[in-house]
Amino acid sequence: MTGDISQFLEKVRTRNAGEKEFLQAVTEVAESIVPFVNSVPEYRDAKILERIVEPERVIIFRVPWLNDKGEVEVNRGFRVQMNSSIGPYKGGLRFHPSVTLSVLKFLAFEQVFKNSLTGLPMGGGKGGSDFDPKGRSDNEVMKFCQSFMTELYRHVGADIDIPAGDIGVGKREIGYLFGQYKRIKGEFNGVLTGKGYEWGGSLIRPEATGYGLVYFAEEILKTNGDSLVGKKVVISGSGNVAQYAAEKCISRGAMVLTMSDSEGFIYDPSGIDQEKLDYIIRLKNVERKRIKEYANKYKCEFVPGERPWGIKCDIALPNATQNELDGNDAMLLVKNGCTCVAEGANMPCTPEAVSVFHKARIFYAPGKAANAGGVAVSGLEMSQNSQRYSWTRDEVDNKLKDIMREIHKICVRYGREKDGHINYEKGANIGGFVKVADAMLAQGVV
Ligand code: NDP
């Protein structure tokens, strides 16, 4: 690490002491961005980097609500408004017991770069709560969402800050949040994305992150004269991103071998086909049960408490959560012949894992590029809401493909190394940074 990078990081560490995930995300970006910033005196003198790591605003609030037994429960709510230089704050809400300020600052920071890469006018933000919807009745989830929005509504708006879903926040939660916002404000507008199609949502939004991830992986393979046909794919997670990534892989002729949840993973050597995937989708979205049920039904292996990275594959798609793939997992993947890792989740690979991929010269696509399809279609949902109009499925899907192709081009432009290898991490960091930095320069010291 050069002196400039370590000095910069030292200040960030002091100011954000103990915020492990946020510091991890900033360190990863700093390693490619600091040398670049130092080569552009305007960025360096305007302290763009020092400003970009400082949220514009952080809101923390109490969320009291009554459970089904009539008891009072108290959770903590957050919204991190990170950067609004290229558009209103945009980023999801996460409901999970692991949510902390550090986790949301890391996600909001990543979101700034990701949203910039989409080419759409969206700033970066993220929010959520340590509330766990798992095992709660619909009534409890509704009560919680209503209380959460009763504070959040003052800080968001269709031209101010537009939240969406993330872990633990799907169509059901967005519905309850939207209902409460509308009730308080008396306005029907595009304050949230990920809405149901009948009430202002966009076609392809539920599919967008998973589909976009696979479109991005296809671009990587295409650059190397290859395709997904016949490829063995290992997927973690069984939520929104994992489900649609699996669906697109299957339809493109790849073989999906694994999916997982927080209890372990299933390994189906004969491949998860569309019919089996439909079962998983019903299991997770309707019955809200555990992935191990799949192993009972289809007579395959369930590996409790483990992640699927030891299974031999060509492509790995970590789609569950941050830091779910470590250095040892990365070594196993490389040893077993994996040539491409594309992140559907945000920061699922630890720094040690990323370093193993770089050394092995395999393709590693960071989440801020590879999973940008979700927020891209959220941006398209905002456009449709403003026009009071809905585009067809094909129109949205084609726009999503174009956006993922364009992000891939940006990564290649900024990430090609001397030996021709494409460093997607560097490409995404610099490519995402430039537009935000230029807007910040133009808008003065604010
Ligand atoms: P979901 O809540 O729909 O699914 C999350 C999946 O990951 C579930 O299978 C869940 O298992 C598993 N999981 C969650 N936490 C852990 C954990 N600590 N350990 C092991 N497994 C875990 O979320 P999404 O699919 O929406 O999000 C997944 C990832 O993708 C996140 O990193 C998110 O930030 C990222 N992302 C999502 C986007 C979107 O559009 N939804 C957009 C861009 C990125 P279980 O059911 O047991 O909890």
Image: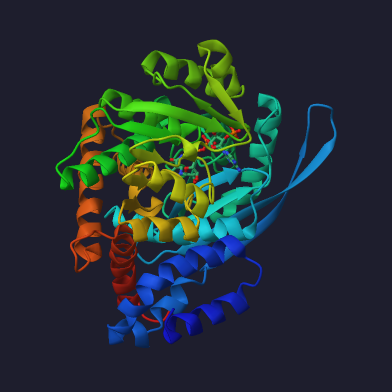
Q: How is the image coloured?
A: rainbow
Residue sticking out furthest to the front: 335
* Residue at x-position 31% and y-position 71%: 439
* Residue at x-position 30% and y-position 44%: 383
In the depicted view, which residue is nearer to us: 390 or 321?
321
Q: Residue 250's image quarter?
A: top left
* Residue at x-position 57% and y-position 24%: 302
Does residue 239 appear left or right of residue 360 in this picture? right
Q: Position of residue 139 (x, y in %)?
A: 69, 26
Does residue 414 appear left or right of residue 441 in this picture? left
Q: Is residue 270 above or below residue 34?
A: above
Q: Residue 108: tell me if it is visible.
A: no
Q: Residue 318: tell me if it is visible.
A: yes
Q: Position of residue 5 (x, y in %)?
A: 44, 80
In the depicted view, which residue is nearer to us: 106 or 225?
225
Q: Position of residue 418 (x, y in %)?
A: 19, 69
Q: Residue 78's image quarter?
A: bottom right
Q: Is residue 69 above or below residue 90?
A: above
Q: Quadrant of the C terminus?
A: bottom left
Instruction: Report the number of discs.
Output: 0
Q: Quadrant of the N terminus?
A: bottom left
Residue sticking out furthest to the left: 225
In the depicted view, which residue is nearer to us: 212 or 270?
270
* Residue at x-position 52% and y-position 68%: 55
